[in-house]
Amino acid sequence: MKVRELMTTNVSFATPNTPISQVAKQMEQLDVGCIPVCDDKKHALGIVTDRDIVIRSVSHGNTSANAQDVMSENLVYASPEMDAHEAADLMAKHQIRRLPVVENGKLVGILAIGDLATQNIYVNEAGDALSDISKPSRPQM
């Protein structure tokens, strides 16, 4: 099965100059944990997660930051034609739960670990990926 068949296609995004308070409000309204960042032509530039907002802004007392100030720029993404198994492997390798889907540089969707789990044939891959994603990246105190 291809990513195209599992991804969410109606994806909200922020621009680099969107204030993080507005990004956080989008997350709240949509009940999501990340918002992709795109230019005005929908070219994917990065992604802002709820954790990015907390670690890169709020914890430093900088609540007036914009999306570009806190976004992760080294965007890991899938293509719509990528096999779902490959996408699950990418999620596990990079310890991410959500994978933007990009075609010709433009955001066309997002694939979440839960999207994989909804298909019986991918339940094991989703579980394996989640297990790898959940491993601590360094020793806990």
Image (tube, rainbow, N blue to C red):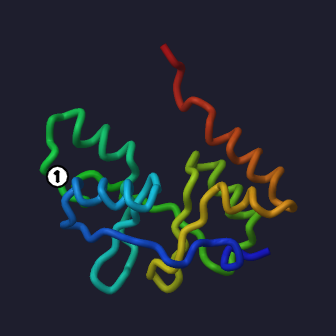
Rendering coords of residue 27 (x, y %): 38, 57
Amino acid, disc 1: Ala
Q: Quick one: which residue is furthest to the top in this view?
A: 141
Q: Along the horizontal axis of the image, is 64 left or right of 16? A: left
The residue depicted at 54 percent of the width and 20 percent of the height is 139
Which of the 4 image quadrants contains residue 98? bottom right
Q: Secondary structure at mark 1?
A: loop
Q: Is residue 110 above or below residue 139?
A: below
Q: Residue 110: x percent and y percent?
A: 54, 69
Query: Residue 119: x, y in percent?
Result: 80, 63
Is 72 above or below relative to 110? above
Q: Could you tell me which quadrant the N terminus lies in?
A: bottom right
Q: Report the residue at 62% width, 32% height from top.
A: 135
The foreground one among 93 and 10 is: 10
Instruction: Name the quadrant containing residue 74.
Output: bottom left
Please tell me whether residue 91 is drawn above or below residue 10 in the rendered image: above
Left or right placement of residue 90 versus residue 26 in this view: right
Q: In this figure, which residue is indicated by the disc labeled 1?
A: 65
